[in-house]
Image (cartoon, rainbow, N blue to C red):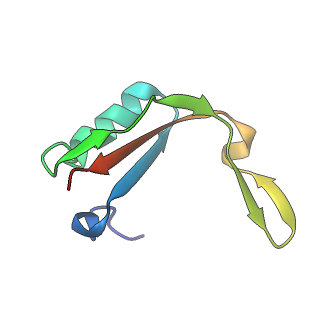
């Protein structure tokens, strides 16, 4: 598995998907996104995720709702 911080300085937006808001925020801190100049760009919301592939629409995370939080690096 790739290191999630490998090309972090090249990424303008980062979205973290987690089972709880607390876990999403913990990852934000653990990855040092605050130090790298990222700030949240909206509400942390619970939602269901699907992926569209060659065989149609497939629910992700076994259909469980997860929290997503998106951060943007300041220019």
Whole-percent x, y for residue 8 in the image: 26, 63
**Residue furthest right as drawn:** 55
Can you say which quadrant of the picture contains the N terminus?
Answer: bottom left
Work out whether residue 64 or residue 7 is closer to the camera in this orientation and state it: 7
Q: Is residue 44 above or below residue 31?
A: above
Q: Nearer the viewer, residue 10 or 67?
A: 10
Q: Residue at x 20, y 56 (%)?
A: 75
Q: Is 49 positioned to the left or the right of 38 in the image?
A: right
- Percent position (x, y) of residue 46? 58, 29
Residue at 32% over, 59% down: 12
Asked which quadrant contains residue 69, the reply is top left
Left/right of residue 73 with respect to residue 63 in the rendered view: left
Q: Is residue 64 above or below residue 71?
A: above
The residue that appears at 32% across and 49% down in the rendered structure is 72
Q: Position of residue 55 (x, y in %)?
A: 87, 69
Determine which quarter of the picture holds residue 30: top left
**Furthest residue to the left?**
35
Q: Position of residue 47 (x, y in %)?
A: 63, 34
Q: Quadrant of residue 43?
A: top left
């Amino acid at each position: 598995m790739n290191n999630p911080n490998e090309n972090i300085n090249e990424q303008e937006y980062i979205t973290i998907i987690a089972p709880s808001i607390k876990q999403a925020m913990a990852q934000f801190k653990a990855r040092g996104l605050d130090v790298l100049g990222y700030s949240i760009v909206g509400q942390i919301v619970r939602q269901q995720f699907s992926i569209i592939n060659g065989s149609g629409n497939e629910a992700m995370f076994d259909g469980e709702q997860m929290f997503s939080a998106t951060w943007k690096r300041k220019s």
